[in-house]
Image (cartoon, grey):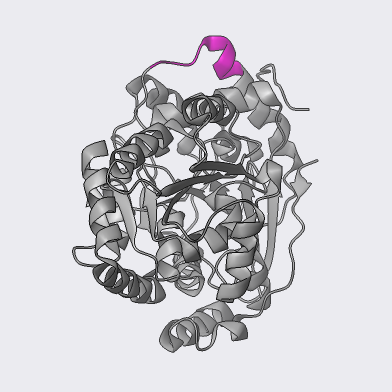
Amino acid sequence: MLDVVDIGDRSLAAYRGVAPDEQLDELVRVAHRLRGARLLHLNATSYGGGVSEILRSCVPLLRDLGLEAEWKIIRGDDAFFQITKRLHNGLQGAPGDLSETEKALYLGNAQLNAPHLAEGYDFVIVHDPQPAAIAGLARHRGSRWIWRCHIDTSHPNPAVWDFLTPYLGAYDAAVFTLENFIPPRFPIRRVAILPPAIDPLSPKNLALPKKLARHILEWIGVRLDRPLVTQVSRFDKWKDPLGVVAAYRLVRQRIPHLQLALVSSMALDDPEAWNIYEQVRAETAGDHLIHVFTNLVGVGNVEVNAFQSLSDVVIQKSLREGFGLVVAEALWKGTPVVAGRVGGIPMQMPPGTGGILVDSVQECADALLHLLRHPQAAHALGASGRERVRHHFLMPRLLLDELLLLEALAGEQRREDPHPSPLPEGEGVSSTVG
């Protein structure tokens, strides 16, 4: 059995006065034309990371709009998620290859999960590489299958890409954040470019009273009588937490009492995070001005909200990035951002909007120092960033774009066998599904 994720109820009406009215009106019109459609979102984890945060908001809103939407997660053990993390890194360009045993375990996981997908969905949206091979094994005639790739696959490791490519041919459409993320020799004919979005009414993004936000951070040991910069991200080499520490220490030579907070959520499908976490702990041990927090010590969405709201500057020094939801989250709170000039981040922060883009540790330090020493300019950047997020990167706009894609797919003529399996009939592959 696939695990069904419990979600609450949401109402689109609550977004009136928050998101642009014209987006909400068009969303209602498009959803009416798709009313009653059965839609499944399928991914690898229900917590930790941007995909799960998006799904926790969008699935109940789809139900409110009249679609029969569900969210399920595949099953797999630690060995499987070790493999998919290597696959993930390879798709972003990391060197190395999967062994034949690892490939067999990955495909075996897909074979054991695929039969548990019930018949009758009109649309199935599969997120990222972990469950990507399932489409060719489920053989759901009549369903439209979409692969939603959230990562930067513009320059994938050729060996890893050659392994995954045959299993993507079963999809009817693919979704990327940027056009230049589409890998070479891409086998899916229809491709949509749909940037992600944040939910302004989630606990992470609701406006916190300043007194409450201060109390939250002081409760966990952050001094608000001293300046504070924060990076909120998974412990991932692509987020460059050690580079953040290095840049911060350069700035602290000029602002001795500056604090740094590294705030992270540990996810089930990211075992590599523990290694990065230990490296960060070792690098920052004994430095009382550096705070390292994870969801394992009770730091959740409300605490992240407080950090993003009260920090003088938020950092997102990514080396690779699909989109960077945490950038939009900080900008929505009017906080200026210093971020890596990669992936979907420049889309959120065009020149003169939101903050400063950087390409190195030194540039990151220089940008932080500039914003800390020029608070009025920093405030103006944060305010412009909030307006950009309101018009382009809130949840109703993402839902509208996705439903327009589903409507277009529904109007296309089906292929005779839309989901041929890339594996020989009856071929058995060992698996790690628990």
Q: Residue at x 63, y 71 (%)?
A: 212
Outermost residue to the left: 351
Percent from the top left, x then y, of residue 354?
30, 65
Could you tell whether 210 is left or right of 296 in the image? Answer: left
Which residue is more in the foreground, 120 or 163? Answer: 163
- Please give the count of numbered marks on the rendered protein: 0
Percent from the top left, x then y, of residue 334?
40, 71
Could you tell whether 410 is left or right of 241 in the image? Answer: right
Q: Residue at x 50, y 55 (%)?
A: 414
Percent from the top left, x then y, of residue 40?
65, 56
Percent from the top left, x then y, of residue 399?
51, 69
Q: Is residue 3 above or below residue 272?
A: below
Using the rendered image of the protein, determine whether residue 272 is visible from the camera's viewpoint.
yes
Question: What is the magenta range?
Answer: 96-104
Using the rendered image of the protein, determine whether residue 208 is visible from the camera's viewpoint.
no
The quadrant of the image that shows the C terminus is top right
Q: Residue at x 29, y 33 (%)?
A: 155
Which residue is more in the foreground, 312 or 298? Answer: 312
